Amino acid sequence: MNTTFKTLSITVALAASLSLAGCATGSGSMPMDHGSSNPMSSTMASAGTMPGASADHNQADIMFAQMMIPHHAQAVEMSGIILAKPGMPAEVTALATKIKAAQAPEIEQMTGWLKAWNVPTMMSDHSGHGMTGMVDDAGIEKLESATGTDAAKLFLEQMIGHHEGAIDMARQEISAGKFPDAVKLGHDIVDAQQAEITQMKQLLTVL
């Protein structure tokens, strides 16, 4: 199954389950390419020409939520994979638990915004355009099959790149977004995930 479709399916299921559970939305607290031609940046640059914006939010806010939802969903998926493996180092399982606990409510929060704005919760072309740091099919399969220390190291390496991608997207929202809660979430993502990157790099030195 294509990674994008797989992740989007997980996103829909996760958002639905969170809604049914009545989870509260939160604003707490996801290489691989960081070139100057960031696709999210170019998309946001033309935001004013696209439908969906209003007085309280703009197209940059919409694109941020639509792209960050599947991005977060993959981080939740990856965390679930590592948490299901026996014998993982306690520090790694604690980090995976933290990532899952932080990002699942943020998916629900962003889904709520998009529904309130009467725009799709997924990008219409399902292309994953602009979602830097996503892990491809082969990478997910490798994580699923890895065991022991190899699995722990692979999770950390993949999640570092994944977090770097989320930080790029969040910084675009901070610079181009209008909706206060979305801009705040962008700041929260940068702060939380940069700290986690530092932690993951340190863990890689001792595994």
Image (cartoon, rainbow, N blue to C red):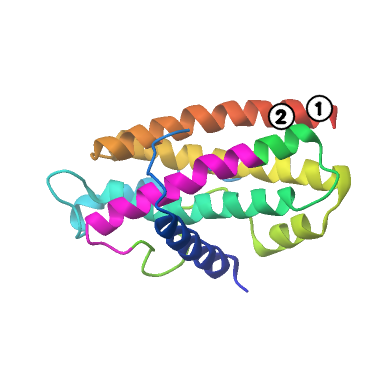
Q: Is residue 120 visible?
A: yes
Which residue lies most toward the bottom here? Answer: 1
Residue on which disc 2 sits: 201
The N terminus - image quarter: bottom right
- Residue 114 image offset from top left, x and y in percent: 29, 55
Instruction: Please name whichever residue, 94 or 171, is drawn nearer the observer in this view of the structure.
Output: 94
The vertical placement of 99 against 146, above or below, is: above
- Residue found 64% across the figure and 26% down from its top: 198
Side of 117 where 130 appears, left or right: right
Residue on which disc 1 sits: 205
The stretch drawn in magenta includes residue 118: yes
Q: What residue type is labelled 2?
A: Lys
Marks 1,2: beta carbons within 8 A: yes
Instruction: Please name whichever residue, 92 or 166, is drawn nearer the observer in this view of the structure.
Output: 92
- Residue found 65% across the figure and 43% down from its top: 159
The C terminus - image quarter: top right
Q: Give the range drawn in magenta.
A: 97-120
Q: How crowded is mark 1: few (under 14 residues within 10 Å), some or many (20 or more)?
A: few
- Residue 45 image offset from top left, x and y in percent: 29, 47
Quote the CA–CA distance across marks 1 and 2: 7 Å
